[in-house]
Image (spheres, rainbow, N blue to C red):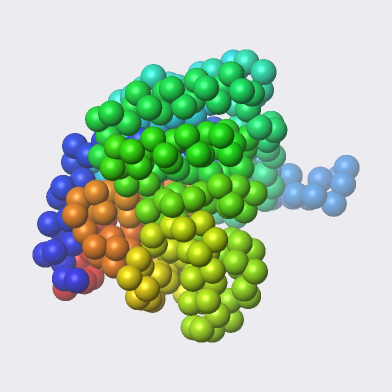
Amino acid sequence: MNYQRAEQIVSKFSGLRIVTLGDLMLDEFIWGEVRRISPEAPVPVVEVKRESWHLGGAGNVVSNLLELGARAIPIGIVGNDEAAKMLRDRFAERKAETDGVITDSSRPTTRKTRVVAHSQQMVRADREDRSPVSNAVEGRVIAAFDQALSNADAVIISDYDKGLLTPRVLRAVIESAQSRNRMVCLDPKIRNFAHYREVDVITPNQIEAERASGVEITDESSLIAAARRIRDLISCRNVLITRGEHGMSMLDDAGGTTNIPTVAREVYDVTGAGDTVIATLTLALASGASLTEAAIIANHAAGVVVGKVGTATVSHDELVAALQDLG
């Protein structure tokens, strides 16, 4: 694929409506410097310089979709707390449609706090409840999804294993999307793997692929065996395995395999790279790209975000600039 074809695909991102169902989080960053060791314990003392808050988890998928010019409809749950207000404010700032952001007062909004000094993450503190949502909340989530689906171009399911994506929710939303001929791309976690049945594309990382398939990936043949095992287990059409510095590898619905080497020049932080991949991949497929074309474009998008520190996104202009490497 050359740059002209890639730019043609990316130009169609604007105006696409993508329903994004998944675990919404608030990513909090405390930025500072370390100049001394605490006299109380052998730990560094971080002198805080600033703090920042970002949409995390499935919220970061939404951020990437919006930065790439698409319209995004998040479906998920938050608590009745300050973190929920901050999440809603950030969605509103980005003009995301928030009718599907449901309050569940019985649990906190998932919040991850990272302390970063000199571009190095020192520690992370998580506030969350990973227990499955109640039957009543399941029903509200399914109803919100069905309402949003009516005018959507595609669906992303972003599973961070925080209790939202129960077997009932997964079964209902996947069947609903299939009944309306909407493509479903899914970023998985191991606990729910058996319930991701018949999606169009699943995007595990290498560790997830190994655990789901029971195949240790050490070479080309074991990589193909793992991808085929995943496809057989859940009857999905396509498997795209993200492999860090080794790029991506995919098994398509015709049985063909393709390896795409990484294009990242520098890797500072892989936080949220999977969110960028599935957002870009889905937009490209919804714009008429083949799976290989979509994966190449998503690979270039990931190459941009891993060069940034913190929960990062890729903008439309940054992606277009990165794709110029295709010639």
**Viewer-closest of 219 and 238:** 238
Quarter holding the C terminus is: bottom left
Quarter holding the N terminus is: bottom left
Name the spot of residue 93 as percent of width and height, x first. 35, 25
**Viewer-closest of 175 and 166:** 175
Identify which residue is drawn at 46% across, 58% down. 235
Name the spot of residue 144 as percent of width and height, x first. 42, 23
Identify which residue is drawn at 35% across, 23% down. 147
Identify which residue is drawn at 53% across, 76% down. 225
Number of numbered callouts drawn:
0
Q: Quadrant of residue 82?
A: top right
Name the spot of residue 211 as percent of width and height, x first. 64, 64
**Viewer-closest of 251 and 96:** 251
Q: Is residue 12 left or right of residue 82?
A: left
Identify which residue is drawn at 62% across, 35% down. 163
Is residue 142 at least partly visible in the picture? yes
Is residue 263 at least partly visible in the picture? no
Vertical side of 138 occupied by 272: above or below: below
Name the spot of residue 297 as percent of width and height, x first. 28, 61
Vertical side of 84 occupied by 260: above or below: below
